[in-house]
Amino acid sequence: MAELDDVIHQPLRLRIMAALNALPVSIGLEFSRLKKLTGATDGNLGAHIETLARAGYVAVDKAFVGKKPQTTVTATATGRGAFARHVATLQEIIAASEGDQ
Amino acid sequence: MIASGVQGNSIMIDRKEASAALSDINDMVRRVRQSRIYDLASQFMVVAGVFVIAGNLATYIAPRYALYIWPSINVLTIVVSGVVSTFDSRRTGLRSFDFRVFVAFVLFYAFGLLCTGVLGHFGPRQMGTFWPIYFMLFYCIAGLWFGRALIYIGLGITVLTLIGYFFITTDLFLIWMAMVNGGGLILSGLWMRWGE
């Protein structure tokens, strides 16, 4: 059985990756939208996005829209692959335990 | 697997935790999808709201030209919605305005015209009441699939439209409709965009 991805497994990071993976490839979510969707605080969300970015799972793009800074987070191809494997492993765990019963 | 925790470098979780994680993922996917639908719907609502205000005010000022004003307003609403959607698809990756949407608009207006002009011969007040209510019927139906906000908006504007129809018997009905239908659409669109 494949192993769970310890970077994605943390609950908030799992929600971030789930949200980003629900979008078409190369489309990202603004930090503020991600914050609303996940229900996280600014600091917490920022720290977990940084962890995901260090792992190469998300790309962070900082730009100015008018005079306002806007941070957009996008799942990378590596991140999408890791997330798909993580979900498959979760499904395998459930299927395996059903087989045991 | 019955253990829960970290063993060596690998994480061990049981069925219950795996189910909870999958359910969390499904919940996020549902939220993102709803957020994107609200985002799109809000754009259409703001565009439609602006044109509804313009249409009602123009009809109030020049009632004799209502027959030209409203078809122009409807065509402009479709065209501008299409343009806004095309530009926005670069940001959201979601193409919302395609041939099927165009056909849906055509069928919508064709059925409305059949009801108001062929089956029933509606006067200006009945027309001014029928079209917003007819429009809101689709909001309510869409809300059954895409989020309750659309149902609340549909019902709210329908009730306000009927209040105007039954209680405002002068030409001020058009001003009322500009406020509750046009203004209502704009405010609802902004609420959906920022309040969801």
Image: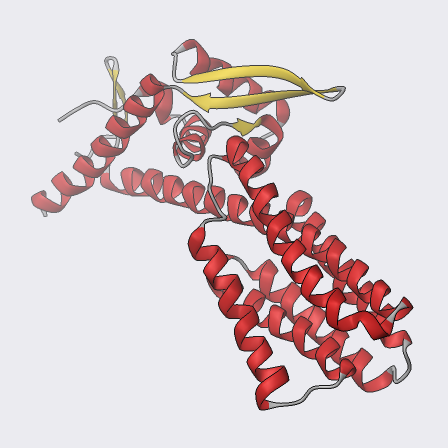
Q: Is residue A39 visible?
A: no
Q: Position of residue B56 (x, y in %)?
A: 81, 66
Q: Is residue B11 above or below residue A100?
A: above
Tell me what residue is drawn at x 58 percent, y 72 percent.
Answer: B137
Tell whether A26 sits left or right of A68.
Answer: left
The residue closer to the viewer here, B6 or A37, is: A37
Q: Position of residue A76 (x, y in %)?
A: 38, 19
Q: Position of residue B58 (x, y in %)?
A: 84, 64
Q: Is residue B12 above or below residue B190?
A: above
Q: Is residue A62 above or below residue A83?
A: above
Tell whether A53 sits left or right of B14.
Answer: right
Tell me what residue is drawn at x 52 percent, y 16 percent.
Answer: A60
Quadrant of res B39:
top right
Q: Is residue B156 above or below residue B39?
A: below
In this view, which residue lies farthest toward the bottom?
A: B120
Tell me what residue is drawn at x 60 percent, y 55 percent.
Answer: B78
In this view, which residue lies farthest toward the top?
A: A54
Quadrant of res A61:
top right
Q: Position of residue B151 (x, y in %)?
A: 59, 66
The residue closer to the viewer here, A33 or A67, is: A67
